[in-house]
Amino acid sequence: MPELALKSGTRPPWIGLAAAVWVEFSAGNSYNFPLFSPSLKSVLGFTQQQITILGVANDIGESVGILPGIACNKFSPWVVLSFGALGCFLGYGLLWLAVSQTLSNLPFWLLWLAMVIGANSSAFFGTAVLVTNMRNFPLSRGTVAGLLKGYVGLSAAIYTEIYGMVLKKSDTALLLFLTIGIPIICFSMMYFIRPCTPASGEDTSEKSHFLFTQGASIFLGIYLLTTTIIADKLSVRRAVCYAFIVAMVILMMAPLAIPIKMTLFPSKNKLTGPVDSSDKLVSDTDESIQTESLLVKSSSEFGGFREGEDASDLDILLAVGEGAVKQKRRPRRGDDFTFRDVLIKADFWLLWVVYFLGVGTGVTVLNNLAQIGYAQEEHDTTVLLSLFSICNFVGRLGGGAVSEYFVRLHLIPRTVWMTVTQLIMVVAFLFYAYALTGTLLVATASLGICYGVQTAIMIPTASELFGLKHFGVIYNFIQFGNPIGALLFSGMLAGHVYDAEANKQGVSICIGASCFKLTFLVLAGLCGLGSLLSIILTLRIRPVYQMLYAGGSFRSRQRSDH
């Protein structure tokens, strides 16, 4: 990655985090496909099969993030965000021209490509802010990942409010907003999303700042759920709807209160020095300070995370530093890995498979939730969708925060929580399979939380095992587990089982537990396998966390507090 000029001071990382909230809202643009897809069918005369193919294009665009990952290592964040804004403008702009009938008779393949490009902008947005903020807060990776991914989960509810209360449920107006409004938001925020001198964690108010930000996001989620129900069930005046939107915007700006507070009431605690985030983020003159930090230098500088160096290793290391010897070795856990390096690591593939089994089975339920509700005679499926969405947000936010607490206090690897949640998913799938009375909502809420935890845990775990230097590419490759799981478990397994049972009943809409019973039993078995593999991964990587978090600045501060 090229050397980037760092913004110094304690406030810039928090300003960047506040700006990232708005970009993460933009990154949820792919969630709007169900809102404007009816117009694609009615205005353009597409069949349901063609709409399904466009939905696949939307999923591909959202999930394929290899190019954004590579771009994060080659360019500054504002360049990556500009690529995303351009893709958003071109992709959704072409769809708007088609739906508004400004251009007619556009070929289907061109609209399919436009859908991929438009949805892929979310990968550029999300990768740019996630990589940048995790490098700016290297000691709070789990908290930051959970927070930012939580806001992506809330973006669906935010778009729904804008669509219903401001755009009057106009599909063309929504596409125009995605074409012009989202790029404007990103261009407005990109100046503030930049590499900063990483937060050292020595500021005693940092914990309270994160708690405030998490609390604000939870309150925003409750607010969105409440106002959506009010607007749907009651006849609300236009002025009240606008007031709801204004209040929502103010709540989205809540994280900005932290840098404002830091300006008006500066902390008396002086930071002892910046913390490296496994990239070379500060100059060599600060090396004496950085050697005391929680996250040590990468393998290219200090030889990686390990104990018990013998004299010969030390001599070689000194010779390398003096330029007398050139040494090349494979990176070890905790070093900065290249993408080629991780492909031959068992830890990487264990993490990939565990994540694939967790999110692949979870997204199967999400994609078929309406049919699951009908099969169990729950006709108001919007309740299930809202419940899953809110619980998914809780899982993302809570997974990052809880794992951060336990990894720092007890050195417990984050993957423990993937094990726990996948075991809970086994129980939830069994509830679905046997359709026990009163278990539908419980299973949906449990699955939503566990599904969110998978993403919140995978992100910081990948960065801690394989470094932040090439994190964008590694993280986006692991995310391939989501669409692959959707294709295998939802498109092939669940769809085939459902259609076969519907044919037996002689109807198009299947009713009864048998509609998905075989599917859920298979998914329960897969999650059981995932939890077993997660245990193996946890045992393998536990020494990394002992190296990372034991005896560092966090421990020193904890002892001084007591």
Image (spheres, rainbow, N blue to C red):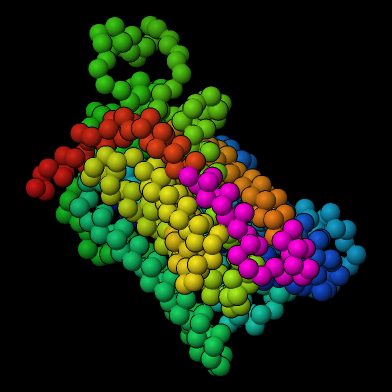
| Residue 299 placement (x, y as % from top left) | 39, 23
Q: Going 63% across and 62% down the picture, which residue do you hit?
A: 514
Report if residue 166 is visible in the image. Answer: yes
Verify whether residue 376 appears in magenta. Answer: no
Verify whether residue 521 appears in magenta. Answer: yes
Viewer-closest of 323 and 438: 438
| Residue 253 placement (x, y as % from top left) | 42, 68
Location of residue 552 (image quadrant): top left
Viewer-closest of 80 and 358: 358
Q: In this view, does 299 lie to the left or right of 294?
A: right
User: Is 116 drawn above or below residue 414 in the view shown?
Assistant: below
Q: Going 32% across and 53% down the picture, which residue do you hit?
A: 402
Magenta span: chief secondary structure: helix
| Residue 309 placement (x, y as % from top left) | 27, 15
Viewer-closest of 22 and 310: 310
Which residues fall within the magenta stretch?
500-528
| Residue 492 placement (x, y as % from top left) | 70, 50
Q: Which residue lies furthest to the right in this view?
A: 105
Q: Residue furthest front?
A: 504
